Amino acid sequence: MNDSFYGEVLTEHYLYPRHQRQLATYDRRQVGVNASCGDSLELQIKFAGDRIQDLAFSGQGCALSRASSDIVCGLLQGRSLSEAQKIIVAFDQLAAGQAHEEQKQLLGEAVSLESALQMPLRTKCVQLAWTLAAQLLRPMSSDNKNET
């Protein structure tokens, strides 16, 4: 796929996010800020057993931050915890420039974020929602003040 296609994917997620909302009920939430760009996000997650029933984001952010948030929410929704964790690891590998083809297949539309991950000033914009999602998937810890 080419950069034009990826640009269209990101534009679609930025302009028409499907997962930007507050959940009526949720099991956990995580908040984070990217001070270098002014992004401020909250992710909320609802579990059904070991599956992610729903995942949504709210807050303010640049186009890349909002598109990335929508992509991660859509990609993880409906997945088991182990599947979601594999996707997070694949994204971390993508961010490090070390993702292999199988991981890129697993990431689907998230591969459209790859070129932005190579821009030092935009990396934090792209990674914020993924970092929050990874934190939501970790076992509860009493020392994490952003979890509820």
Image (cartoon, rainbow, N blue to C red):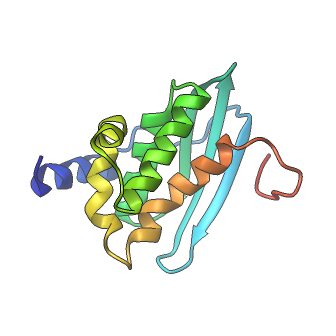
- Position of 59 with respect to 126 (left or right) is right
At x 70% / y 31%, what residue is drawn?
Answer: 25
In the picture provided, is 27 more to the left or to the right than 43?
right
Q: Nearer the viewer, residue 15 or 35?
A: 35
Q: What residue is at 30 percent from the left and 51 percent from the top?
A: 15
Number of numbered markers: 0
Q: 124 and 54: which one is in front? A: 124
Closer to the camera in the image, 58 or 76: 76
Percent across and percent down for residue 5 are 13, 49
Residue located 29% across and 36% down the image: 105
- Determine whether, in the image, residue 2 is placed left or right of residue 145: left
Q: Position of residue 2 (x, y in %)?
A: 10, 52
| Residue at the farthest top position | 49
Residue 34 visible in the snapshot: yes
Name the foreground residue: 121 vs 148. Answer: 121
* Position of residue 77 measured from the top left corner of the image (x, y, whole percent): 50, 30
Taking the image as drawn, is residue 19 in sight?
Answer: no
Judged from this view, the residue extending furthest toward the right is 142
Which residue does the image show at 61% across and 30% down from the upper left? 81
Indicate the position of residue 142 as horizontal and vertical percent values. Answer: 89, 51
35 above or below 5? below
Quadrant position of residue 62: bottom left
